[in-house]
Amino acid sequence: MTGQDWIEKDFYAALGVPKDADQAAIKKAYRKLARQYHPDQNPGDASAETRFKEIGEAYAVLSDTEQRQQYDAVRSMAGGGARFNAGPGGAAGGFEDVFSSMFGGGARPGAGPQYQQYQSGGAGFEDILGSMFGGGMGGGRPAGFGGPQQRKGADVETRATLPFRAAVEGTTVELTVDGKKITARIPAGVHDGQKIRLRGKGRPGQAGGPAGDLLIAVHVTEHPVFSIDGANLRMTLPVTFAEATLGTTVEVPTLSGEKVRLKVPSGTPSGRVLRVKGRGVATAKRTGDLMVTVQVVVPQKLSKGARKALEDFAAEADGEDVRAELTAQATQ
């Protein structure tokens, strides 16, 4: 993806979130749209696949704090996406076209039939910002200074779909990119939409410049019980009304197949989250926890005895207004 892409594409609009959205809102919007437009849900729909790619691009940038700051800065410098019109004879071009002509090169997007690939190794906003801040993303000398200009090779992007368990535990995948087989190690705890960067595995550089990178956009299939939240795993635990009211100890499944005993305190409401330590994702830095959300199950059918007991309970609790606080707050 080039600097011109950052100027022209409104990633906040792609995810339908405001510019001041926090990470939770961005993640929620991405998950909803990714499920809606995923190619597996829309076979043969080219527009849905394009939309899915746009959503993934937007989330990859906005979910990364550093990239999001850079994106906001570039968009601010460019006036929020307006193109820069310049050049002899009134020729129109983007910011990247103008800057590339100044430094002797330009990035050209490309695509292969099997993997959505984007070249971003040419000179452009990346080169200028890199020189401003001491990074040098594109690299190389300006044209006309004693020989061919060194350039970093273009980055290449591909996709990999992982089973949920493989994403939690980490795995190795084999990919074919530009006719070459590449083995990539996927770290434990990778989340849906995350991009893994393999440095030096992209297109060859020019005039002795370094090779570009390979970016792997990861899609993680859903699990019927568990979900990933950073280094933690999450699940929902159904309990009966009596268990939630009186308290109980229940067995909870874990991803490893073991069961652990979890205490549900008396008076536990639906939505309360209980923690099982050390039963989350084991990464190189730490091991997360299993976060259990309690869901009180309301019975659909009652026996005569159960109904009588519940009516007696309601009579004993008569006079308690559980919605009193709600009514008071609504008048504020």
Image (cartoon, rainbow, N blue to C red):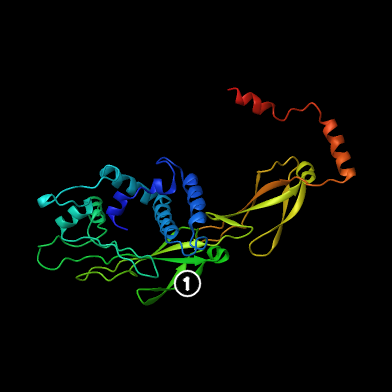
Q: Nearer the viewer, residue 122 or 52?
A: 52
Q: Nearer the viewer, residue 188 or 28?
A: 28
Number of on-image labels: 1
In the figure, residue 150 lies in which quadrant?
bottom left
Residue reaching furthest to the bottom: 180
Q: Quadrant of the N terminus?
A: bottom left
Q: Is residue 307 left or right of residue 147?
A: right
Q: Is residue 180 left or right of residue 299?
A: left
Q: Is residue 321 left or right of residue 293?
A: right
Name the residue rendered at 74%, 49% in the picture: 239
Residue 205: image x %, image y %?
25, 69
Q: Secondary structure at mark 1?
A: strand
Residue linked to disc 1? 173
Q: Quadrant of the C terminus?
A: top right
Residue 39: image x %, image y %?
48, 62
Inspect the image, locate mark 1, and give the three-letter code of the amino acid beneath it: Val
Number of residues whose C-alpha sits closer than 10 Å to that of mark 1, classed few (under 14), some (14–19) or many (20 or more): few
Name above or below for residue 16 compared with residue 212: above
Residue 272: image x %, image y %?
66, 43
Q: Is residue 229 left or right of residue 311?
A: left
Residue 163: image x %, image y %?
55, 66
Name above or below for residue 249 compared with residue 43: above
Name the residue rendered at 82%, 33% in the picture: 314
